[in-house]
Amino acid sequence: MTDAARKLLDAAMRLAPSERAKLAAQLLATLDDAEPDADWEQAWVAELSRRVDGGSETESWEAVYTQLRARR
């Protein structure tokens, strides 16, 4: 993450939860037309397959998301 993005994130984290939710929704909406990253998509499919096949049901989605983001 760039310094500029980190500063924006830090500022956003000081917003009220409802404002953060609105901001997040608007940011996500801008990605609807973005070309998916093949590695990212493949990692999600692999994780979903692992879970369906009896993977860890106790691991939170936040932990999995953090792990996948770290691979990017």
Image (cartoon, helix red, strand yellow):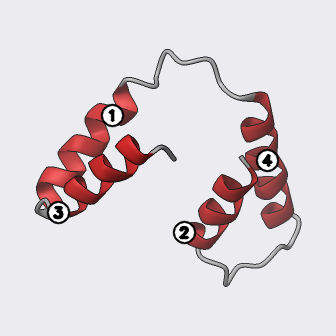
Sort mark 1 into few (<14), some (14-19) or many (20+) by Cα contacts within 10 Å: few
Q: Residue drawn 28% across and 59% down?
A: 10
The spot of residue 24 in percent (x, y) is: 30, 44
Mark 1 element type = helix
Q: Considering only order in the chain, which callout, 4 or 2, is on the residue closer to the N terminus?
A: 4
Q: Secondary structure at mark 2?
A: helix
Could you tell me the amino acid type at mark 4? Ala
Instruction: Using the image, tell me which numbered label, if any, was put on residue 13.
Output: none
N-terminal of the pair, mark 4 or mark 1, is 1
Q: Position of residue 40 (x, y in %)?
A: 73, 40
Q: Earlier in the sequence, mark 3 or mark 4?
A: 3
Choose between 57 and 67: the one closer to the eye. 67
Closer to us: 71 or 26: 71
- The residue that disc 3 covers is 17
Question: Can you name the residue that lies furthest to the bottom here?
Answer: 58
Q: CA distance from mark 3 to mark 4?
A: 29 Å
Name the element at disc 4: helix
In the figure, 55 relative to 16: above or below? below
Badge 1 amino acid: Leu
Tell me, for residue 62, which label it has, or none.
2
Q: Amino acid at mark 2?
A: Glu
Q: Which residue is mark 4?
A: 43
How far apart marks 2 and 4 lie (CA) works out to: 15 Å
- First in residue order: circle 2 vs circle 3: 3
* 3D distance between C-alphas at marks 4 and 1: 22 Å
Q: Which mark is residue 27?
A: 1
Which callout, 1 or 3, points at the residue further toward the start of the chain? 3
